[in-house]
Amino acid sequence: MKLTCLVDNAVLQYTPFWGEHGLSVLVDTPEGRMLFDTGASGTVLLHNMEAAEVDPESIQALALSHGHRDHTGGLAAFLERRPGLPIYAHPDVLRERFSRRDAEMRAVGMPVYRSPEPPQEGGMRAIGMTIPPEDLRRRADLRLSPEPQEILPGVWTTGEVTHRTEPEGRSPYHFVRGEAGWAMDPYRDDMSLILETSRGLALLCGCCHAGLLNTLAHVERVFGRPVVAVFGGTHLISADADHLERVRQRLQELPLRRVSPSHCTGETAFHFLLQALGPKMVRPFPAGAQVDLEALE
């Protein structure tokens, strides 16, 4: 079983891959191949697939970690190349998402995901999926469930992370439409992938808005096996020192062989984990990188 990072904020040096604020990972198994998320744009996704010599028609399924545009922005372009694709996600993935962080994001040089519609009341801008739900149902085979789903043999969605006793990967700028107006995004659709290997379970996260520690506890409770590797976005970018220390303690309790946090992890959190767990275990996973899960040291 092999992972190839197709889209990430960072790019493997001296390669033809492009980077953007987003995430997409190719999962190759003996029984087939699938995509996890589609990055923020079809331009970068399709370019990087070509750079990795991945034919879109070879993809048998797609899983979406959640509905934000930096994980679903390449979906429309990809479905042009692979219509009728089975898509696995939480039902809430179709929910509208909004942000009012434009000014703050511009101030620190982060990308602002524009929608063709003008801002909503209160300066809200759409940051959810660009494909209307009815169009997506027409163009793809939607398989939406809050429960774990097996996509390929040995590859599962985690299902909804319902128990969240530890801090979540939240942003104060993310909103949804509630019954009484704007409400904080509950991130109910946030899910990760579980990959069954001979060494144990590998956890592939999209953004981990549900919280890394909550997700790890959910996996242990539902799947009943230890997590030996963690890849992808962990949304520790806003974690304080106490939470990072709690993450370190929990990770050191696991029989981990690899931790490769990317995308929304943040440089502070990455270097904290690198110093705490060591360079043999903590390694980057930029666009263009490949990992053989059965060969982890």
Image: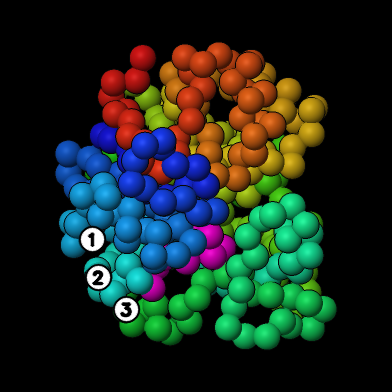
Please name the residue that numbered disc 3 is placed on: 139
Please name the residue that numbered disc 1 is placed on: 56
Instruction: Give how far across and how far down residue 184 sits, in percent.
Output: 76, 64
The residue type indicated by label 2 comes to: Arg
Res. 52 in view: yes
Instruction: Give how far across and how far down residue 280 sits, in percent.
Output: 47, 14
> Residue at the spot x=52%, y=71% of the render?
129
Q: Which of the pair 111/220 is nearer the observer?
A: 111
Instruction: Determine the CA span between mark 1 and mark 2.
Output: 6 Å
Q: Which of the pair 11/190 is nearer the observer?
A: 11
Give the mark nearest the N terminus, 1 or 2.
Answer: 1
Q: How is the image coloured?
A: rainbow
Would residue 183 be found to the left or right of residue 154 on screen?
Answer: right
Instruction: Determine the CA span between mark 3 and mark 1.
Output: 15 Å
Per the image, label 1 sits on a secondary structure element best described as: helix
In this view, 180 is above or below 15: below
Would residue 141 be found to the left or right of residue 278 on screen?
Answer: left
Per the image, label 3 sits on a secondary structure element best described as: helix
Residue 248 occupies quadrant: top right
Judged by depth in the image, the label closer to the viewer, 3 or 2, is: 2
Mark 3 neighbour class, 10 Å CA radius: few under 14, some 14 to 19, many 20 or more: some
Q: Which mark is residue 81?
A: 2
The residue type indicated by label 1 comes to: Pro
> Residue at the spot x=56%, y=63% of the render?
68
